[in-house]
Image (cartoon, grey):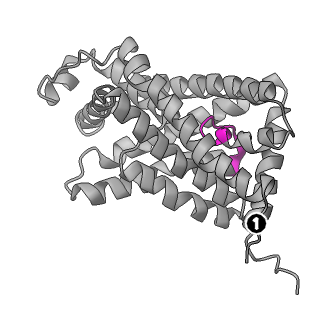
Amino acid sequence: MEDSKLDAYIPADMAKRAEASGIRKANRDLISAFFLAIQAGAFIAFGAALFTYVIHDSTLPVGLTQLIGGLSFSLGLILVVIAGADLFTGDTLMVMACFTGAITYRKMLRSWIIVFTGNLVGSLAIVLLVFYSGHWLGNDGAVGAKALDIANTKVNLTVLQAFSSAMLCNVLVCLAIWLCYSARSVTDKILAILFPITAFVAMGFEHSIANMYFIPAGLLLKSNPDIVSMLGNPDFSQLTLLGFLVKNLIPVVIGNMVGGAVFVGSVYWILYLHNPVEHE
């Protein structure tokens, strides 16, 4: 008996859909790819801004606060998947199409560079808009103080912490994307996204594109003495452009790539495209 059209796609079919998605992305023209990437950067930044606002004055236990924040942040990937945009971290799954020979390494790397750059532009655009909107003044500046605290925490991770946390993050992000390939409806996709994304945010893992919002927002806010004083004037010596790049962005990007390309994309390529296994 044929599978019902209401049933989810099985993993073997999900792998084929992932491969086809990689082919489409690799063959996009420069302008389309860049603007889709700008959208994704902006969408993730919206999720990050919502996360900051929702948790900034929470008096709930830490775990529950992070859980609620994670649900809020899920807005970002929901917008990426449903509205249609290209997110660098999710695009690490393009290795599946590359390993089958459907696209070249050169095309994949070209796509990653374009998308990463577009994500950065989109994220920074939202940082500036949020800053000049005065959003951070909410609750007598407590929103801005929380944003500054988040940024400072991120640049004070060790390189190993940032790298390891980024690997774990993108395993969950790519699993969310992978689960979306099983979906037949918008509702299916939203449910597929919610749990993995909530998990990575609640556990405090590092997402390179989200950090393109969080840390630049902190860089702008640290120049405001009123916001700084609300945190008790902590040490902001690492919260610099160099600190952002060296202490966070570079190790987090590498960790995200390893987590998505190796631990999700490569594994499912081996299981369902290189050496297919039956799935009941």
Front residue of 138 and 123:
123
Residue 206 can be seen in this image: no
For the point 29% across and 31% down, the residue is 144
Give the secondary structure at mark 1: loop
Q: What residue is pinned by disc 1?
A: 277
Q: How far across and down, in percent of the image, does residue 223 sit?
A: 27, 14
For the point 51% across and 57% down, the residue is 196
Q: Amino acid at mark 1?
A: Val
Quadrant hosting residue 115: top right
Front residue of 167 and 111:
167
> Is 276 placed above or below 150 here?
below
Residue found at the far bottom of this picture: 1
Give the side of residue 41 with respect to residue 3, left or right: left
Q: How far across and down, in percent of the image, does residue 129 sit?
A: 49, 26
Quadrant hosting residue 88: top right
Give the side of residue 129 with respect to residue 33, left or right: left
Residue 106 can be seen in this image: yes
Front residue of 81 and 129:
81
Q: How far across and down, in percent of the image, does residue 131 sit?
A: 41, 25
> Is 29 placed above or below 169 here?
above
> Is 224 placed above or below 47 here?
above
Bounds of the magenta segment: 82-92
Front residue of 186 and 196:
196
Q: How far across and down, in percent of the image, does residue 247 sit?
A: 37, 22
Give the side of residue 130 with respect to residue 40, left or right: left
